[in-house]
């Protein structure tokens, strides 16, 4: 792999770096999901505010989606931590 040539790593070391990069990217995407939901809700609120509309904005779908995302992350945290420990030890 290219990391092995540049940083003089073994195959296992370059494999660990690639896996760490993939896990970091996945973590960053998961951390952005609540922010995306907040942006969607605030965009709808701002649009209705400037349209002088009296329509009500239901935050329930956004709150439910956020709760589901956080529940999935909480339930899988031990599994993810176990995978990270296995990657680090191998």
Image (cartoon, rainbow, N blue to C red):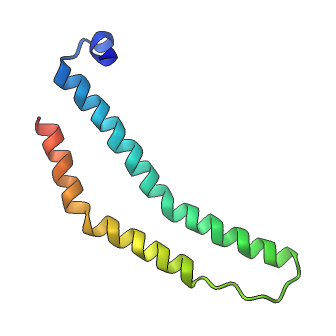
Q: Could you tell whether 41 is left or right of 47 in the image?
A: left
Image height of 32 relative to 37, above or below: above
At x 44% / y 56%, what residue is drawn? 31
Residue sitting at the far right = 52
Q: Could you tell whether 8 is left or right of 57 in the image?
A: left
Number of marks drawn: 0
Percent of width and height locating residue 20:
30, 37
Image height of 25 relative to 32, above or below: above
Percent of width and height locating residue 81:
20, 54
Percent of width and height locating residue 50:
86, 74
At x 64% / y 85%, what residue is drawn? 58
Residue sitting at the far left = 89
Image height of 15 relative to 79, above or below: above
Q: Quadrant of residue 1?
A: top left
At x 27% / y 15%, what residue is drawn? 4
Percent of width and height locating residue 7:
29, 14
Image height of 16 relative to 31, above or below: above
At x 35% / y 39%, what residue is drawn? 22
Q: Quadrant of residue 73?
A: bottom left
Q: Could you tell whether 39 is left or right of 13 in the image?
A: right
Quarter holding the C terminus? Answer: top left
């Amino acid at each position: 792999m290219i990391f092995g040539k540049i940083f003089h790593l073994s195959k296992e070391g370059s494999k660990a770096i690639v896996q760490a990069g993939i896990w970091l990217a996945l973590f960053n995407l998961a951390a952005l999901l609540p922010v995306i939901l907040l942006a969607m809700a605030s965009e709808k609120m701002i649009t209705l505010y400037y349209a002088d509309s009296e329509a009500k904005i239901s935050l329930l779908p956004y709150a439910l989606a956020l709760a589901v995302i956080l529940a999935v992350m909480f339930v899988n945290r031990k599994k993810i931590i176990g995978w990270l420990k296995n990657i680090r030890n191998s």
